[in-house]
Image (cartoon, rainbow, N blue to C red):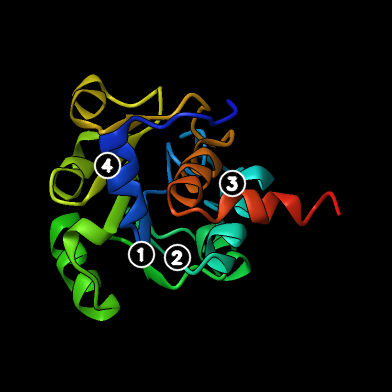
Amino acid sequence: MRKRSLIPEELQARAAKVKLLIMDVDGVLTDGRIFIRDNGEEIKSFHTLDGHGLKMLHAAGVRTAVITGRDAPSVAVRVQQLGISYYFKGIYDKLAAYGELLAQAGVAEDECAYIGDDVVDLPVMLRCGLSAAVPEAHWLVRKHAGYITQSGAGCGAVRELCELIMQAQGTLAAALESYVK
């Protein structure tokens, strides 16, 4: 994860407005691999850096949401552990879920950030205020992303985006300072 110092002005302006961070799961919060046991149970790997970044973002007053095409029990557990406010699972039409999410959360499109990795994420990415992608994302997703993380999928990419948002909103320094007092 790179240390943030200067954020381009347009990116900072977009990040400063964010009230809701929306995430895909596979290929964003995970590295995209799905392990399936003989009994059909899916096993996913989540990074603690991402988890703590989300907890810091929550403490800074930004809510979070997940919109995922799969319905894995392990994701539901992780969503609950992290205190993610909105969870849309088994979603085929992410744009329809996004519209429902906006209504539930009471936020405008320019107050949302979305991080994705595949073409199914583009309909939401093209409408939200701040779109982000992981470096491993499909080329078309990277082409339309307003920000591409340096950290990889399932390896701190979400943490990086959380810190970018917090820096733009002026809450990152105090959050980090609290750990060295």
Q: Position of residue 18 (x, y in %)?
A: 34, 58
Whole-angstrom CA distance, mark 4 to mark 3, is 17 Å
Q: Which residue is denoted by mark 2 in the rendering?
A: 62
Q: Secondary structure at mark 3?
A: helix
Q: Residue furthest right?
A: 181
In this view, the residue in front, 127 or 168, is 168
Question: Are discs 3 and 1 less than 8 Å apart at CB?
Answer: no
Residue at 27% across / 24% down in the picture? 138
Q: Is residue 5 left or right of residue 104?
A: right
Cα gap from disc 2 to disc 4, whole angstroms: 16 Å
Mark 2, Cα crowd under 10 Å, few <14 / some 14-19 / many 20+, is some
Kind of residue sitting beneath label 3: Asp
Give the residue at mark 4.
Answer: 131
Q: Give SS at disc 2.
A: loop
Q: Nearer the viewer, residue 7 or 148?
A: 7
Q: CA distance from mark 3 to mark 2?
A: 15 Å
Q: Earlier in the sequence, mark 4 or mark 1?
A: 1
Q: Nearer the viewer, mark 4 or mark 1?
A: 1
Number of other residues with Cα within 10 Å of mark 1, as a class: few under 14, some 14 to 19, many 20 or more: many
Q: Quadrant of the C terminus?
A: bottom right
* Residue at mark 1: 19
Q: Is residue 141 left or right of residue 12?
A: left
Picture coordinates of residue 161 (x, y %)?
46, 42
* Residue mark closest to the camera, 3 vs 2: 2
Q: Are marks 2 and 1 in contact (CB under 8 Å)?
A: yes
Contact between marks 4 and 3 (CB within 8 A): the answer is no
Whichever of labels 3 and 2 marks the residue nearer the N terminus, that label is 3
Q: Which residue is mark 3?
A: 50
- Camera-side residue: 123 or 16? 16
